[in-house]
Image: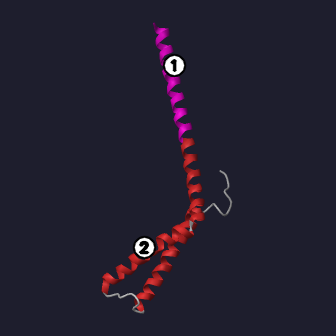
Amino acid sequence: MTSNGPEKSHATLRYTSMRVSIFLGCLLVALLLGHFQVIPVSGEAGMIFLFLLAAIASAPLSYALLSKQRDAMSAQVGGKVAGLRSRTAERIAAQNAEEDAADDAARAATARQS
């Protein structure tokens, strides 16, 4: 197992926590704007509107601000997928070799009996 260093070992967790933090910051701003009647909010539908507003505002902010973290997460996930693919390919090759050996042994036994 290779070490990716402390900056890449938890890239997915870091990206996710920063994305949630940006959303919560946008939600706080939206709630404050609603509280001070900058954005008219009435009832449950108004609260849902504020949550949607926070989600819509946080998406482009996350895209712009977290590109470095997103790239690190992508590299981490890509490395794990590549390792999984290579181990799977090795397992399949080993199973094919076992099947070929068993098939060759069965053919050899059939040829000796004939």
Number of numbered labels in the structure image? 2
Of the image marks 1 and 2, the number of the one nearer the N terminus = 2
Give whichever of 95, 81 is nearer the camera: 81
- In this rendering, would 3 be left or right of 86? right
Residue 12, position in %: x, y? 55, 62
Task: Determine the residue positioned at 51% across, 32% down.
Answer: 95
Task: Determine the residue positioned at 52% across, 67% down.
Answer: 63
Residue 42 is tagged as none
Which portion, as a residue range, is magenta? Answer: 88-114
Residue 81, position in %: x, y? 54, 49
Neighbour tally class for label 2: few under 14, some 14-19, many 20 plus, Cα within 10 Å = few
Residue located farthest toward the bottom when viewing the structure as drawn: 36
Q: Amino acid at mark 2?
A: Ile
Residue located farthest toward the top when viewing the structure as drawn: 114
The residue indicated by pointer 2 is 56
Q: Amino acid at mark 1?
A: Ala
Whether residue 38 is situated above or below residue 77 in the rendered picture: below
The residue indicated by pointer 1 is 105
Callout 2 secondary element: helix
Task: Determine the residue positioned at 48% across, 79% down.
Answer: 26
Whether residue 48 is situated above or below residue 2 in the rendered picture: below
Give whichever of 34, 1 is nearer the camera: 34
> Which is in the foreground here, disc 1 or disc 2?
2
